Image (tube, rainbow, N blue to C red):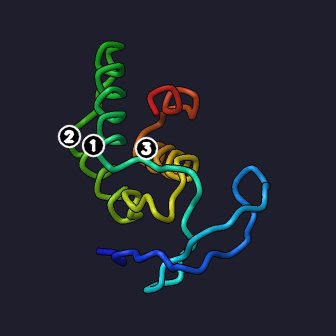
Amino acid sequence: MGCVHKSSAEKLWLPSENGIIRKHSYCCNCGIVKTTSQGKRLGYFINALAALERYLTSKGFKFSRVQKRLIVKKLEEFEIDDVYSYSFKMQKEIFIKVVREFTNLRVEIIESFV
């Protein structure tokens, strides 16, 4: 389990993902800078995985329970659920990387479900 983030009252001027300088909060406990974009919770990615599974089964490919379980466990290890420090873009990249690790799917196919 990660840090229970508590935003600081003071804010730092830092570049955001699009390069614009903005004020960012940071966690008083661990020092992680809060992302300016809103990430998604783990359930969003589990739903995307289920949609991907339905698509693959409809095309005649096998997607085992073990693969799904390993993907979810790996996502939990990355603490992808931490919307304080992960932007949706970063979460999406991690999701694609993890799914590709356990399947032979092209990036474009995985991206279409996220």
Give the Cα separation between the discs numbered 3 and 1.
9 Å
Residue at image point 36% right, 42% down: 45
Measured as percent of width and height from the top left, residue 43 is found at 29, 44
Residue at image point 29% right, 21% down: 54
Measured as percent of width and height from the top left, residue 55 is found at 35, 19
Q: Amino acid at mark 2?
A: Arg
Name the secondary structure under disc 2. helix
For the residues bearing labels 1 and 2, Cβ distance under 8 angstroms = yes
Q: How many marks?
A: 3
Q: Amino acid at mark 1?
A: Lys
Residue assigned mark 1: 68
Numbered circle sitting on residue 99: 3
Q: Front-most of 87 and 53? A: 87
Among the two numbered marks 3 and 1 on one chain, the one whose residue lies closer to the N terminus: 1
Q: Residues within 10 Å of mark 1 (few under 14, many from 20)?
A: some
Residue at image point 41% right, 47% down: 40
Give the Cα separation between the discs numbered 1 and 2.
5 Å
Q: Amino acid at mark 3?
A: Val
Name the secondary structure under disc 3. helix
Q: Front-most of 96 and 36? A: 36
Say left or right for 57 vs 9.
left
Q: Front-most of 74 and 90? A: 90
Measured as percent of width and height from the top left, residue 24 is found at 62, 68
Q: Looking at the image, is 73 positioned above or below residue 63?
A: below
Which quadrant does the N terminus fall into?
bottom left
Q: Looking at the image, is 58 positioned above or below residue 94?
A: above
Q: Residues within 10 Å of mark 3 (few under 14, many from 20)?
A: many
Say left or right for 39 vs 67.
right
